[in-house]
Image: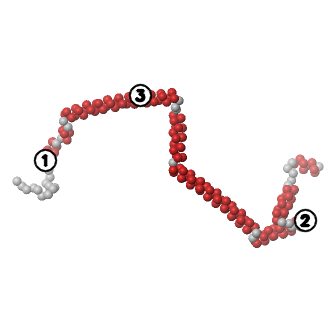
Amino acid sequence: MEQRQQGLLEKEPLQEVDEDMVSEVDLNNTITEEEKEEMHNELTKLEEEIATLKQVLASKERRHSELKQRLGITTLSELKQNLSRGWTDVQSSTAYKKTSETLSTAGQKTSAAFSNIGTTISRKFGDMRNSPSFKSFEEKVESTVSNIKSKVGGSGSGGSFEDVLSSAAQASAQETPPTNPTQSTESTC
């Protein structure tokens, strides 16, 4: 006999006899006929139990539906109840409480910031009005208006910037033509 053991893997290919032996092994023969019959019986019992359980479940679902109908419980009322319960759960959660507190704090800080901005803008306008540049501009406008008034025939009394603006507004109100066209034609006739 020849020594063929050179390692774990043989380098020679399988021979016909070896291939025949491999094909003769049937993996399904590991279960006996008695075991197969027991398995078929168990399978049949399980299928019967499943069918029975389906019938019982269908019967219970019908009874459930009848009771809900007699009690006046509709799908809509159940949905409202579930939403109400869910909202209550959300409001009692720590995440909601923390978020609510954070938003409240942010709102207060934003309100304070806008208040500070308003105060700052107001102060800046006051500072600007008291600045030499604005005073110079105001004086130039007042002198220009005074010159125009004196040339047009108004009083040359000058006055403050506010007085000049109010008198200009009054003058423009007096110069507006009447809105009723029949009045203007009657006065000319």
Nearest to the observer: residue 169 or residue 14: 169
Identity of the residue furthest to the left in this view = 1
Dot 3: what SS?
helix
In space, the residues marked 2 and 3 are separated at their CA atoms by: 104 Å
Mark 2 secondary-structure assignment: loop
Does any portion of residue 21 appear in the rendered image? yes
- Which residue occupies 90% across, 65% down? 155
Q: Nearer the viewer, residue 40 or 4?
A: 40
Sequence order check: which comes first, mark 2 or mark 1?
Answer: 1
Query: To which residue does mark 2 refer?
Result: 155
Query: What residue type is disc 2 on?
Result: Ser
**Residue 78, position in %: x, y?**
51, 36
Could you say which is closer to the camera, residue 11 or residue 160?
160
Distance CA(mark 2)–CA(mark 1): 133 Å
Mark 1, Cα crowd under 10 Å, few <14 / some 14-19 / many 20+, is few
Disc on res. 119 = none
- What residue is disc 3 on? 59
Task: Between residue 185 and residue 50, name the one nearer to us.
Answer: 50
Q: Is residue 132 above or below residue 177?
A: below
First in sequence, mark 1 or 3: give its number: 1
Categorize mark 3 by other alpha carbons within 10 Å: few (<14), some (14-19), many (20+). few
Q: Which residue is mark 1?
A: 18
Percent x, y of residue 127: 73, 68
Q: Is residue 168 left or right of residue 48?
A: right
Marked residue nearer the N-terminal end (2 or 3): 3
In this view, the mark in front (2 or 3): 3
